[in-house]
Amino acid sequence: MALIRVDGDTVTIEDLEVTDPGLAQLLTTQPEELRAEVLTRAIAVGVRGLLSMGLGIDLSEIDDRVRRSILEATAEARREVETVLTTAGHAFEAQLSPEHRSSTVARTLNEFTAWRDDFLARMDPADADSNTAVFLSQLASLVGPAGELQRRLEEALDPTVDTSAFAQLGRSIEDRLTELRDAVMHQRGRAEEAEAGTQKGFDFEESVENWLREAVAGLGGCVVERTGRTPGEFSADAMVGDFVVTLADGARIVVEAKNTARINLAGKDGILDELDRAIVNRSADFSVCVSAREAFPREVGQFGVYGHRLLVVDQGDGAMTSVAIRWAISAMAAERQTRGELDHGLFEDRLQRIRQLAQLMSGSRRSLTDITTSVENVRGTLEQLRTELLAVVTDLDREVTRITRPAEVVNLRPAVGSEG
């Protein structure tokens, strides 16, 4: 039994137990500290509802009133919806029904019919003014008998007209056949030239072999081998290195003979790399390239030293080949000797002088070819230059022989700032 006390506006309820699923669900969703506040608000709302419907009215009567209100509201809403639907139906019929001439659909159908009739009229080939009739007439004038297309085809295919396609095609075929003929003749000429160049290379190798034997003839114990067709250390087909000069002390000089118009210096196909490969392939200590022409780049000149590689131009008498071999022998001897101090200035000075004399010899040789009236004078100059070149090499031999105590390996490259 619950105890209820009313003190003014304050109501105290003790030991009240209410069985109501809705109230239980409402309170379980709220935190415990807020449940008293929520329950108070629920009671207040219920009280105000009962007061608004009249105190003392049975709850069943309240339910009937609520149901009647809901039914009346539903009926009113149904009537409003029916009114709106009726109005919308009339508007739809007025705008979209093809039966009403003023509707949008009816007007659109009428316009489409008029456009269709106009389009078909424009496409009707039976109407002389239609687009189709005009197009067919113009097409007939172009591709019909005696039309523009036939006339142009006849002109383009007439081989007697210089500007026709057939005439141009005929000229193109003739030009191509001429090019093919010229290419065949050129290739044949290249083959003959290559064969002649190969023969010229063999002839120059013969000359270089003779010059090498003359260069070492007085040294004793030297051997000159022609190795251009013999495989070396690289592989079974490695033929680089045309000659090998073996000295009495076992030192080896590999020689390449070149008779070409141009010799590159550096790069994959450059002569310096080729001489390096020749040193390895022939197990040599020094390498020399003898060129029959002034084919080296300008910076090389007639006589260029690049470490253990020497480039020289010998145009016909073997003098520069002899100088190159003597230089190589002196350079290798200077590196092997361990006695005395080597005069680097002397080597640099002699290298510079050799290059100058070689240049003078080349100029004199050209003068000998061009000026026939002074053949004897130029020949005397050549002999004098050759004698002086050999004397310079002899000076180098004496300098190497003069060495009397250990020394560092000699760098034969010219000092920075000196020519050559």
Image (spheres, rainbow, N blue to C red):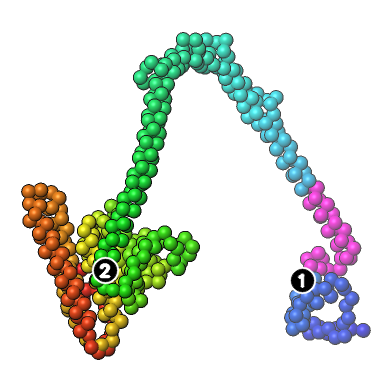
Identify the secondary structure beneath mark 1.
helix
Q: Can you name the residue that lies furthest to the bottom here?
A: 405
Badge 2 crowding class, 10 Å Cα cut-off, few under 14, some 14 to 19, many 20 or more, is few
Residue at point 22% right, 80% down?
400
The majority secondary structure of the magenta stretch comes to helix
Observer-nearest residue: 144 or 310? Answer: 310
What residue does disc 2 label? 217
Q: Residue 143, relative to residue 239: is it above or below? A: above
Q: Say which of 53 and 216 sits in front.
A: 216
Residue in the foreground of this view, choosing between 37 and 306: 306
Query: Residue 45 bears which disc, if any?
Result: 1
Can residue 281 be seen here? The reply is: yes
Left or right of 15 on screen, residue 274: left
Which secondary structure lies at badge 2?
loop
Left or right? Give the position of 159 relative to 116. Answer: left
Name the kind of residue labelled 1 in the image: Val
**Residue at image location 25% in from the left, 65% down from the top:** 214
Question: In which quadrant of the rendered image does the N terminus lie?
Answer: bottom right
Quadrant containing the C terminus in the rendered view? bottom left
236 and 346: which is toward the camera: 236
